[in-house]
């Protein structure tokens, strides 16, 4: 399908120049373009100006500083997978990246672009919400740091204002020993959107050897990624003695799945309970050094 809409094209050499261009009416930013090009072809967007960001080297960095992982807006999923820093500090992020689309898409698509799409089934939503990530935004009026939980407003709608550009994300890293797991339910192996997904992180607490902090979030079972705070509270109270029957009963109170062409709400609800149990077991095993390798198939 060809692009039939006419627009101007600019490739700025600096972030300041990019922000000035994006301040114009009907200007859109191009990073990986895996979503945007499809939208242009389908006539879903009709910009007057396309601002190509790929020349901005400062947006291509992956850094560990100040107790957080900083990922620039031009970092692709393939680069997330290959990053030694991410592999050492937050290997579950590479596990998530491997589940995004296909190799060809991962070579072009950016993590920040996935975040900006704000579709309910996005793979990056659960980890960013659960880990209290910050979305770093700049505009002509200054910079903002938006908590991931407040970033998602509704399907395909975010807290970004017109003229603003997401320059990257910042993910605070656990201070103690930690492990995590991400499970994505699809209809078949290979490139598919999530029917449901769950992210679990377990961190050893400074309160004692048996004390643990839990983070849990679901995706594709509500209009936006949802943090499961009731489940987190129950897990923290139970410590090592997890009552999975009682825990599974909390799942319906945390998510609001729908029935669509990819799955029924009943199937999504049931599988979220199954995935929660498996993700907890995998994360616990990884924390103890006996769990499955990151990226192993658990469904």
Image (tube, rainbow, N blue to C red):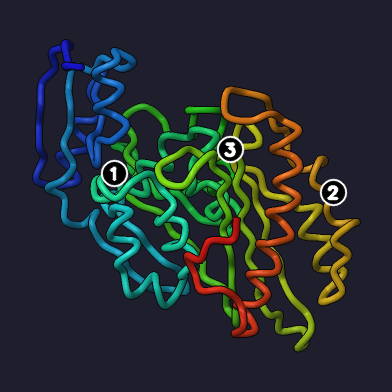
Residue 250 numbered mark, or none: 2
- On the rendered structure, is 237 left or right of 7? right
Residue 195 numbered mark, or none: 3
Q: Position of residue 189 (x, y in %)?
A: 46, 47
Q: Position of residue 49 (x, y in %)?
A: 17, 22
Mark 3 vs mark 2: in front: 3
Residue drawn where x is 76% and y is 43% of the image: 270
Dot 3 or dot 2: first in sequence order is 3
Dot 1 or dot 3: first in sequence order is 1
- On the rendered structure, is 211 left or right of 204? right
Residue 5 numbered mark, or none: none
Dot 2 or dot 1: first in sequence order is 1
How many residues crowd mark 1 within 10 Å: few (<14), some (14–19), many (20+)?
some
Pointers 1 and 3 in contact (C-beta within 8 Å): no
Mark 2 vs mark 1: in front: 1
Mark 2 and mark 1: span between their CA atoms?
36 Å
- On the rendered structure, is 4 left or right of 76? left
Please, which residue is most extreme toward the bottom here? 209
In the image, residue 67 above or below residue 97: below
What residue is shown with label 1? Answer: 105
- On the rendered structure, is 277 left or right of 222? right
Residue drawn where x is 65% and y is 51% of the image: 217
Q: In the depicted view, which residue is nearer to us: 41 or 190? A: 190
Name the quadrant containing residue 97: bottom left
Residue drawn where x is 23% and y is 57% of the image: 60
């Amino acid at each position: 399908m060809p692009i039939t809409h006419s627009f101007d094209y600019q490739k700025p050499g600096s972030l300041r120049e990019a922000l000035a261009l994006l301040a114009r009416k009907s200007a859109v930013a191009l990073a990986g373009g895996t979503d945007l090009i499809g939208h242009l072809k389908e006539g879903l967007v009709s910009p007057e100006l396309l601002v190509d960001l790929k020349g901005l080297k400062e947006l291509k960095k992956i850094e560990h500083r100040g107790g957080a992982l900083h990922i620039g807006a031009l970092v692709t999923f393939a680069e997330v997978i290959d990053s030694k820093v991410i592999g050492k500090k937050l290997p579950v992020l590479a596990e998530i990246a491997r589940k995004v689309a296909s190799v060809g898409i991962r070579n072009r698509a950016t993590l920040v672009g996935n975040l900006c799409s704000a579709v309910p089934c996005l793979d990056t939503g659960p980890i960013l919400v659960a880990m209290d990530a910050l979305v770093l935004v700049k505009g002509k009026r200054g910079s903002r740091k938006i908590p991931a939980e407040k970033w998602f407003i509704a399907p395909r709608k975010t807290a970004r204002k017109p003229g603003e550009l997401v320059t990257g994300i910042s993910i605070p890293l656990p201070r103690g020993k930690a492990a995590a797991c991400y499970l994505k339910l699809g209809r078949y192996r290979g490139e598919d959107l999530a029917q449901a997904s769950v992210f679990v992180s377990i961190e050893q607490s400074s309160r004692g050897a048996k004390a643990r902090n839990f983070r849990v979030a679901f995706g594709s079972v509500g209009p936006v990624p949802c943090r499961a705070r009731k489940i987190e509270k129950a897990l923290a109270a139970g410590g090592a003695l997890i009552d999975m029957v009682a825990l599974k009963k909390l799942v319906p109170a945390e998510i609001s799945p729908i029935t669509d062409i990819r799955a029924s709400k009943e199937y999504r609800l049931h599988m979220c309970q199954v995935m929660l149990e498996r993700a907890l077991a995998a994360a616990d095993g990884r924390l103890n050094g006996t769990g499955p390798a990151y990226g192993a198939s658990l469904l």
